Image (spheres, rainbow, N blue to C red):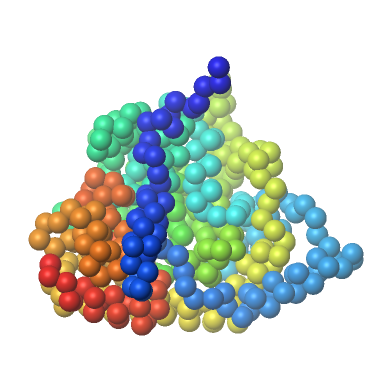
Amino acid sequence: MIRSNENFSKMSDSYLFATIAAKVAAHKQAHPQEQVISLGIGDVTRPIVPAVVQAMHAAVADMGQAASFHGYGPEQGYAFLREAIAKHDFHARGIAIDADDIFISDGSKCDVGNIQELFAHDCKIAVTDPVYPVYVDSNAMAGRAGNWTGTHWDNLIYLPCTEENDFVPDFPKEQPDIIYLCYPNNPTGTVLHREALQAWVDYARNHKALIIYDAAYEAFISEPDVPHSIFEIDGAAEVAIECRSFSKTAGFTGVRCAYMVIPRTVQVSAPQGKMVRLRDLWHRRQSTKFNGCSYIVQRGAEAVFTPQGQQQVRAVIQEYMDNAASICTGLRALGLRCFGGVNAPYIWTKTPQGMASWEFFESLLKQASLVCTPGAGFGFSGEGYVRFTAFGTAEQSAQALQRIAHLSL
């Protein structure tokens, strides 16, 4: 008899955003005449910028000529992209990250889901709450989360991020082995300033823990005291790895390209107490299970770092952040409390009249054909909030605010 992985049976039947998509599809079918505005799932809407398109066209032409054709690429990614990343994202900020520490992939979601394979089954996991669901679900699938109680997993360490602590997690009473941090944060849109992030790096060093730092939204940072990389922090190269993505930065959600940074100075314990470099384990994993991101996509990603690419990408990001500012202003004018929207494209909004987050989601969908994301889907500390994204057009953002204003909340 073939047995399934018993950990899957402990999970809900559907991923959060798949559940939302099903509800939206049912609403559209029941109300085909209504135009649905989606400020829920964090998918971009602006097209890929011209510099990237031109580079990808040239790469397609390369693939059509025998002399410039590329088959299987290097499992770690092409040197031209890794070197561009090292120079632009790290060396320009005085960070000593080498191209050999960088691994190109087809998305940060894959990276943060797959990295847990490198750790022992009994490693203790800490996550902020609310939290991007992949951190939790991937460890639940591996059996580290324990059992679902109806509100939380009983073997995870939760680090609540709430209005009461200004969305800065307190250090846990129980010692974790692995700590997931995402800043600028998804879903709350809040940040850790330099002093707070230094404190977490110091904590990890003192407790021999590893920080998995998701910096997928660093390109949206506008305040000077918010680090763009955890490796700006003293000591981080000993205890942290970092995930980054071109999805939101350059509109690659449908193209797929990201990268993981694992400094060679990050070591973990192997059998008999031997210390091994985590990057070597990841390299072994990737070379076995991953055939690389395509040459065409990597040439497009390289073009993001050209002067033209940077100018064009920054202009698109500014469009999204203008949306974020207008959404925040509009929601506050309607008497709603909201957070984020300054260093991230997400606006974390407290529901009116103490409504449950799924209840508010249903009200917006049914009464206004407007989609948000229920905060409860990100964890129990997300109850009583919803997430709006700034990835729509300016017109959609303005119309969404008008629809909310006409509701009787």
Choose top left, top right, bottom left or bottom right for residue 189: bottom left
Residue nearest the observer in this picture, 202 or 402: 402
Which residue in the rendered view is the most extreme toward the right? 67
Query: Looking at the image, is 172 positioned above or below residue 366?
Result: above
Q: Residue at x 35, y 73 (%)?
A: 33
Residue nearest the observer in this picture, 394 or 110: 394
Task: Find residue 172 and report its horizontal and vertical position in percent.
Answer: 27, 39
Choose top left, top right, bottom left or bottom right for residue 90: bottom right
Q: Residue at x 39, y 54 (%)?
A: 22
Task: Find residue 49 and report its horizontal and vertical position in percent.
Answer: 57, 78
Residue nearest the observer in this picture, 152 or 224: 152
The answer to whether residue 192 is seen in the rendering is no
**Quadrant location of the N terminus in the rendered image:** top right
Residue nearest the observer in this picture, 337 or 21: 21
Q: Residue at x 52, y 22 (%)?
A: 3
Q: Is 41 on the left or on the right of 278, as rendered?
A: left
Q: Residue at x 67, y 63 (%)?
A: 298
Task: Find residue 9 and report its horizontal and vertical position in percent.
Answer: 41, 30
Q: Is 107 on the left or on the right of 26, as rendered?
A: right
State how many labels appear. 0
The answer to whether residue 317 is seen in the rendering is yes
Which residue in the rendered view is the most extreme toward the top? 1
Task: Find residue 405 and report its horizontal and vertical position in percent.
Answer: 18, 76
Q: Is 361 on the left or on the right of 78, as rendered?
A: left
